[in-house]
Amino acid sequence: MNKEEEDKIIKQRDKWFRDNIKWLEHDVKHKICKTSGPMSDYAGDLLQVAVLQFLKKPLEVQYQMISEEKAGWYILVTCTRHIQSSTSPFYSQVRKFKMSVRSGAMPENSNEDDPGADPFADFEWYQCFKREMNTMSFYHKQLLTDKYQDCLTFGEIQKKYNITKNSLVNDIKNALQFLRCRCDNNCL
């Protein structure tokens, strides 16, 4: 694809967004986040993350989705999946930092807004987890950090370390089993 074709696709994509952004904003706020729900304040952030995910796709794919009238539905489905997942980029980039109490999952006095506070410091299992993470090999510790703290996908981790997906999944399972065995006495 030459520069002229790329520019043409980008112009069409930008025109599509100008024509459809109000519709997307309305549906995300009123249908996905529910107007009166606590997530309605984050509808714009949610839409932004979904649009960015769409824009990361190759230009040919973007063009095909727009010309087949699938782009809007792709973005809305992406929003729905992001709002339902605690491992999505929306959760890791926006929601966990902005919502002080998420659906009653965290106690009101958790000091979640204080970046220096450790809300789980008093839990025995968390202390065991921290202690045992330090005894793990660097490789397994880094895989768990990448997957569960940095919220990278398996594909992103696979590219980062240039390993097969089967090896990656097995290594993460082994690291989690090690922690379960040590902290829950749940050895198989």
Image (cartoon, grey):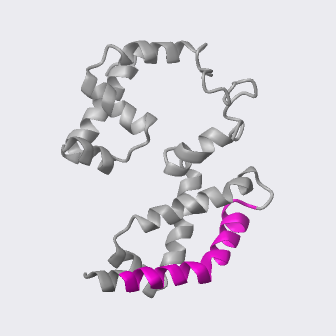
Marks counted in the figure total 0
Q: Quadrant of residue 147?
A: top left
Query: Is residue 30 a member of the stretch shown in magenta?
Result: yes
In the rendered image of this protein, does residue 33 appear above or below residue 138?
below
Viewer-side residue, 57 vs 174: 57
Residue 20 placement (x, y as % from top left): 61, 80
Name the side, left or right, on which 17 lies relative to 9.
right
Name the side, left or right, on which 154 lies relative to 149.
left
Query: Is residue 161 a member of the stretch shown in magenta?
Result: no
Residue 124 placement (x, y as % from top left): 54, 12
Q: Main secondary structure of the magenta part?
A: helix
Residue ID at (53%, 69%): 75
Residue 22 placement (x, y as % from top left): 67, 76
Viewer-side residue, 36 vs 16: 16
Residue ID at (32%, 13%): 135
Residue ID at (50%, 13%): 127
Quadrant assignment for the C terminus = top left
- Which range of residues does the magenta coloring cover? 7-34
Q: Quadrant of residue 98?
A: top right
